[in-house]
Amino acid sequence: MRKTHLANGLVVSAIGLGCSSMSHGYGPRDRDNDESIRVIQRALDLGVDLFDTADAYGPFTNELLLGQALGNRTHNAKIATKCGLVTAPDGTFRRDGRPEHLRAACDGSLRRLRVDAIDLYQLHRVDPKVPLSETWGALGELVAEGKVRALGISHATVDELDEVHAIWPITAVQYELSVWATGNRGDVLPWCRRNGVGFLAFAPVGRGYLSGKLGPSTLIDGDSRNRDPRFGAEAMHTNQTIVERLRSVGARHGATAAQVAIAWTFAQGPEVVPIPGTRRLQWLTENVAAADLRLTAADLRDIDELPAAMGEMSWDNTRDRDTGRRTEPAQTSRT
């Protein structure tokens, strides 16, 4: 497995593993902790060393699962977890960027993950009720104390990135990036490139849709994708055009649509590390193999000529900072 240099000395596998869906988001029906543990351990065997989680996933259970799965192999892993987003009993979120909360959250994550230091500690969301300088300053103190090795941030605007980067250097920014979620190519991704900062691309397979294996009837009650306009019945039908194009490109390389989707994220820049999530060994093997797929200029043109996905939105522009719920979606263009 080739490596990617994020920033500030953090080197990770070119592709990571998003662990969220093992404990959170897609509904409990298909969750299987034993299978998830096998997936995490097999990922290590395949050369994957970046594992992304958060205290909000579960909440807490995803970190516990990852800590259990890694066991005595944590020295082979780079753990990226997140703080600053608190899960309410009804499944909604509230933001908490208070320094005292972040300190307690870090200690909790260290215990659950069974490590002495977190490789990449990411602010999950910016709390508008707390000065960002206070929030980020507290995270910088955790680095100085040795509890955290590097800092990252998720769903921040370019202005917010500028502000925190001047206080303590950012190692990686995390956002959704995929063939059907392209909005960050115009601002956040260029910011990362200019500043030599890594970009962790979550959901590169479009939360499973870009694999071509999902239809409206496959989503169950409790699945967070039911609230995503891209997963409405009409949108899923319309967006099949995207899947068919990925399959067409894949046929040129003997690759699947999901592998082409992941390879597309690699093609967005050397700073991009896709972190596809999966709960199944079969899909893990397929995803990891995408690290060796190189799309041609013609392949990329064919994909970029597609219209924007029906229901595509900017997660930053549509977020409700108090509840974590999305508000009115905004259509975005591909270019």
Image: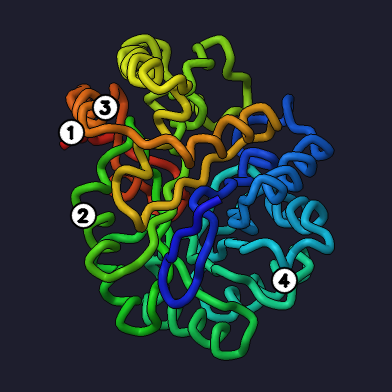
Looking at the image, which is closer to me, 322 or 190?
190
- C-alpha span from label 3 to label 2: 24 Å
Residue at 65%, 41% in the rendered image: 24
Local SS, label 2: loop
Give residue 253's position: percent from left, percent from top. Answer: 40, 23
- C-alpha span from label 3 to label 1: 19 Å
Task: Identify the amino acid type marked 1.
Answer: Ser
| Mark 4 burial class by Cα count in 10 Å: few <14, some 14-19, many 20+ | some
Res. 187 mark: 2
Of the residues under marks 1 and 4, which one precedes in the sequence?
A: 4
**Which residue carries the number 1 mark?**
333
| Mark 2 burial class by Cα count in 10 Å: few <14, some 14-19, many 20+ | few
Res 216 seen here: yes
Local SS, label 3: helix
Q: Eyeballing the image, is 272 above or below 246?
A: below
**Which residue carries the number 4 mark?**
110
Determine whether, in the image, residue 179 is placed left or right of residue 216: left
Of the residues under marks 4 and 3, which one precedes in the sequence?
A: 4
Of the residues under marks 4 and 2, which one precedes in the sequence?
A: 4
**Which residue carries the number 3 mark?**
299
Of the residues under marks 3 and 2, which one precedes in the sequence?
A: 2
